[in-house]
């Protein structure tokens, strides 16, 4: 019975994965809209982007339920597969540091172009022409395309650029460039150099903080290792964990899982930096 349930569950998960893959392919073939997507559209895009992880989570949940018959364990394992990879790594912080480093490099390059006598729009286009930092390559390419091809007003293009960066530091740089575009005055290169220096200081501080937060992620890995050991014991020593097969045992297991979840969320927050608040909106919200 368990083998049949396992095969049926895995088949259902594979069918779901295939359907999500088709949706992802169809969505990838369309051009990105000029206007930034709504929050609901971003949620759907994130769902499609992580469909493999979702399918894996469903498959693991079904496998755990087929092997143990514990619905609480199946749900907890599925949620763990979805959430623990993010909690155990500092990928988000590392990516943000790379983005800030790229913004610093691009801001200095833009300042040099302005010193050389380029107009702001021309400097923006040329700064995205070659040696684009990978972390901001897509937003920069879109900015240059809007200025060169669609002839969008500079302020609107910069607001969209800030929205695609989705970072408070990006808002500060875009706001400075918007003021330059409005006033057409001198001193823009000096402002950009000062902003680049501030971004460099921010990057240095974040690297120090990230080194301290790595200790909390190490604690999370130890907890996950202990839970993995207990899970192996539950699979191979069923007589030892037999009391959890009763309704009362499942209730106790749910409480224990909830305590572990709260602890892991707390440790994850200790090891994660707050993203900060943005202050620029897209042109349609002015």
Image: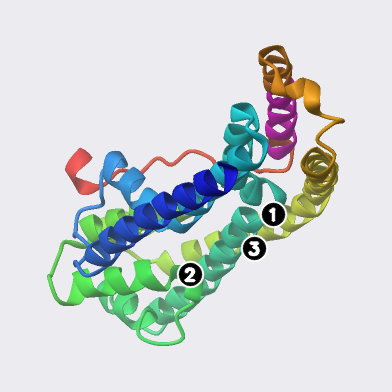
Quickly name the residue at label 3: 200
Give the Cα distance between marks 2 and 3.
Answer: 11 Å
* Percent coordinates x, y for residue 149 in the rendering: 14, 76
Q: Secondary structure at mark 1?
A: loop
Label 1 or label 3, whichever lies nearer to me, is: 1
Q: How many C-alpha atoms fall within 10 Å of the one at disc 3: few (<14), some, or many (≥20)?
A: some
Q: What quarter of the picture does the C terminus occupy?
A: top left
Horizontal arrangement in the rendering, residue 278 relative to residue 245 (left or right): left
Of residues 63 and 80, the one nearer the viewer is: 63
* Percent coordinates x, y for residue 175 in the rendering: 37, 52
The circle on residue 89 is: 1
Q: Secondary structure at mark 2?
A: helix
Q: How many C-alpha atoms fall within 10 Å of the one at disc 2: few (<14), some, or many (≥20)?
A: many
Horizontal arrangement in the rendering, residue 210 relative to residue 17 (left or right): right
Does any portion of residue 72 appear in the rendered image? yes
Residue ID at (29%, 40%): 40
Q: What quarter of the picture does the N terminus occupy?
A: top right
Q: Hey, which quadrant is residue 253 in on the image?
A: top right
Instruction: Decide which of tag 2 and tag 1 comes sooner along the chain.
Output: 1
Query: Image height check: is 221 above or below 262?
Result: below
Does any portion of residue 184 appear in the rendered image? no
Q: Hey, which quadrant is residue 119 in on the image?
A: bottom left
Label 2 or label 1, whichever lies nearer to me, is: 1
Query: Image height check: is 260 above or below 233?
Result: above
Segment colored magenta: 256-268
How many discs mark residues in the rendered view? 3
Residue ID at (22%, 70%): 29
Quickly name the residue at label 2: 107
Of residues 181 and 39, the one nearer the viewer is: 39
Horizontal arrangement in the rendering, residue 99 relative to residue 185 (left or right): right
């Amino acid at each position: 019975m368990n083998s049949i349930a396992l095969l049926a569950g895995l088949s259902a998960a594979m069918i779901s994965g295939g359907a999500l893959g088709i949706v992802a392919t169809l969505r990838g073939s369309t051009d990105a809209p000029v206007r930034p997507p709504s929050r609901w559209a971003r949620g759907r895009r994130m769902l499609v982007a992580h469909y493999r992880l979702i399918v894996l989570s469903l498959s693991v949940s079904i496998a755990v339920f087929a092997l143990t018959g514990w619905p609480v364990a199946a749900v907890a394992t599925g949620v763990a597969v979805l959430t623990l990879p993010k909690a155990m790594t500092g990928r988000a912080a590392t990516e943000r540091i790379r983005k800030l480093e790229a913004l610093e490099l691009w801001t200095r390059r833009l300042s040099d172009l302005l010193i050389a006598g380029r107009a702001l729009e021309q400097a923006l286009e040329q700064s995205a022409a070659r040696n684009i930092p990978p972390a901001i390559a897509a937003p920069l390419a879109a900015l240059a395309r809007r200025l060169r091809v669609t002839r969008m007003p500079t302020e609107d293009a910069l607001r969209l650029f800030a929205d695609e960066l989705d970072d408070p530091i990006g808002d500060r740089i875009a706001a400075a460039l918007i003021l330059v575009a409005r006033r057409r005055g001198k001193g823009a290169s000096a402002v950009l150099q000062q902003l680049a220096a501030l971004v460099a200081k921010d990057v240095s501080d974040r690297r120090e903080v990230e080194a301290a937060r790595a200790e909390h992620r190490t604690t999370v890995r130890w907890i996950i290792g202990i839970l993995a050991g207990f899970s192996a014991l539950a699979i191979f020593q069923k007589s030892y964990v037999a009391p959890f097969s009763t309704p009362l045992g499942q209730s106790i297991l749910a409480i224990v899982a909830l305590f572990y979840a709260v602890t892991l969320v707390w440790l994850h927050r200790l090891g994660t930096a707050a993203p900060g608040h943005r202050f620029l909106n897209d042109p349609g919200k002015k």
